[in-house]
Image: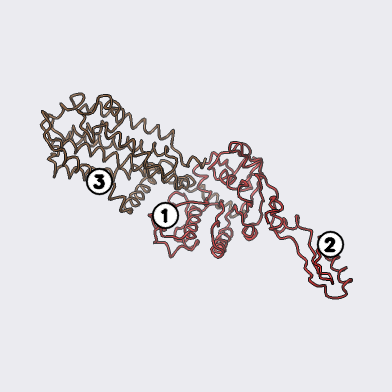
Chain colours: A brown, B red
Amino acid sequence: MTTTAVRAHSETSSGRLPGAWGLGLQRGALEIKQFFRQRDQVVFTFAFPVVFLFLFASIFSDDVQGAGITASQLYVPAMMAAGIMSTSFQSLGISIAIERDEKVLRRLRGTPMPPAAYFLGKIWLVLVTGALETAILLLVGTTLYDVDLPSDLGKWADFAWIFVLGLTACALLGIAISSVPKSGKSATSVVVLPFLVLQFISGVYIAIDTIPDWMLNIGALFPLKWMCQGLRGVFLPESAQVLEQAGGWEFGRIALVLGAWCVGGLLLCLLTFRWKNRRDG
Amino acid sequence: MTTQAHQLAVHVRGLRKRYGDVTAVDGIDLGIRQGEVFGLLGPNGAGKSTTVEILQGNRGRDDGEVSVLGSDPATGTRAWRSRVGIVWQDESAPAELTVRETVRHFARYYPKPRDPEEVMGLVGLEEKAASRVKALSGGQRRRLDVALGVIGGPELLLLDEPTTGFDPSARRQFWELIRKLADEGTTILLTTHYLEEAEALAHRLAVIAKGRVVAEGEPSALRERFGTEATVEWTEPDGTPREERTDTPTRTVAELMHRFDGEIPGLRVSRPTLEDVYLRLTGQEDAR
């Protein structure tokens, strides 16, 4: 028996451990499969921002004085930004907390899976769901609420980096906040409240020119405000810049804030991520 | 590490772990040889799970030396993790995936995995391969847990109370599975609070109580060491039942034969069962 064990050992040592990037792709495919198999979750995840867009853009549809746009048009980029944050921050924050509570994470930790593969898988999931969500909202916005797709290639490039940086920053924040709730049961409340507050003070539900400055300044500390602003810059006419707090789109500053949140969010994740529940030690 | 430690699959010296004021593990020594099935037996709260979690590398320790397959689990590398299989007490696999998808996916984590179809057959889940995990019964899920524990072809398998909550027939099927794995040469450490389980599976076992090893050895040796005293029971002619504890039951019976001159009414000679020994060792004698 001893010989068997010794032989098994040397065989294993000669075998190469699979790489994090490839396993990340595998995990991504698995995460996407799991996500789309939960029908109710799929429907509600995608429907939520669409329903809100429909409600707000239909209720508030008047022309905005001196900006050359309607209130409905304002809601399209706002809801796209909120949609990106909901598919990344909210869904990761809740689902990882539940996976931790159900000890899925602890099991993964007991395998030779590199931790990076787990996070890469989550990023792939979020990229796919976030892109789908954004596409659906853009479709609704262009067909129902007179939003024009930009003809300028530069604007599409802006759209691309705002999407990727915003999604990454929010995904990392979602991973970080997943360590806050004590159990999977409390995860929804812990994650949804800050998201809801941010949506109010970042110009998603309420136009930024009606929000008190001090609230807007708090909102400006987080990515959502800048994602909204950037998407307005991509999808609204230049005349609408007058509504901005700074009177312009500020693409440079947006890139800086979102980039900083990507770095900060990554550090936060590395420092706070737990594979086990607190009561599991 | 000594040479001896290298030959042992698991080598533990003076292991200690405290949770606040509570000492869960209070100086445990263990030596598990390669290829053996080792049972860690003890009542709830004796420190079994804490010990196993430390061996898995999932919990830190306060003191003591631990070597699992030649490495300290606290600093276990990916290569080390690929050689250790874990079957948890209460684990959940992703509910929306099928059994086959789950087993195949976990196989990808390992450098030299076993064939997923073969492993599903080994644990008796080949007919459930296309079922979603959420549709499995409790016993089937536990078998999936074992499949995921062995898919990497581990040299050492750690099972923490694998049959808790099983009905008797599921438990016996599970034992067969463990024996199959042991026959393949896998070193197995299992914790249990079922004495018959330890006796049926383990080549050697350690009884732990209150964070300490109170006895260690082969199940039969344990019984003999702690149970040389036999009990002789009989009934007197006037109908009073009598019993005598003795180290020499044969002599007692011979004397009785002489006295009764033939059949002894109600004669019974019994050795303590492993359970009696176990309850005495773990200080639960009164619990009977």
> Label 3, on which residue?
A132
Q: Are marks 3 and 2 in contact (CB under 8 Å)?
A: no
**Residue B249 higher or lower than A71, as above or below:** below
Q: Are marks 3 and 1 on the same chain?
A: no
Q: Nearer the viewer, residue A128 or A89?
A: A89
**Residue B144 higher or lower than A148, as above or below:** below
As helix, strand or loop, the secondary structure at mark 1 comes to helix
The chain that hosts pointer 1 is B
**Residue B13 higher or lower than B132, as above or below:** above
Amino acid carrying label 2: it is Thr
Distance from disc 1 to disc 2, alpha carbons, whole Å, reads 59 Å
- Rendered residue at 60%/38% (across/down): B18
Distance from disc 3 to disc 1, alpha carbons, whole Å, reads 26 Å
Which badge, 1 or 2, comes first in the chain's sequence? 1
Q: Nearer the viewer, residue A178 or B126?
A: A178
> Label 2, on which residue?
B248
Q: Position of residue B109 (x, y in %)?
A: 44, 49
Amino acid carrying label 3: it is Leu
Q: From the viewer's perspective, is A185 left or right of A158?
A: right
The chain that hosts pointer 3 is A
Q: Nearer the viewer, residue A235 or B57?
A: A235
Q: Position of residue B8 (x, y in %)?
A: 63, 48
Image quarter of the N terminus of chain A: bottom right
**Residue B46 higher or lower than B264, as above or below:** above
Marks 1, 2: nearer the viewer? 2
Q: Position of residue B26 (x, y in %)?
A: 65, 41
Q: Residues within 10 Å of mark 3 (few under 14, many from 20)?
A: some
Say which quarter of the image contains residue B56. Answer: top right
Marks 3, 1: nearer the viewer? 3
Amino acid carrying label 1: it is Thr
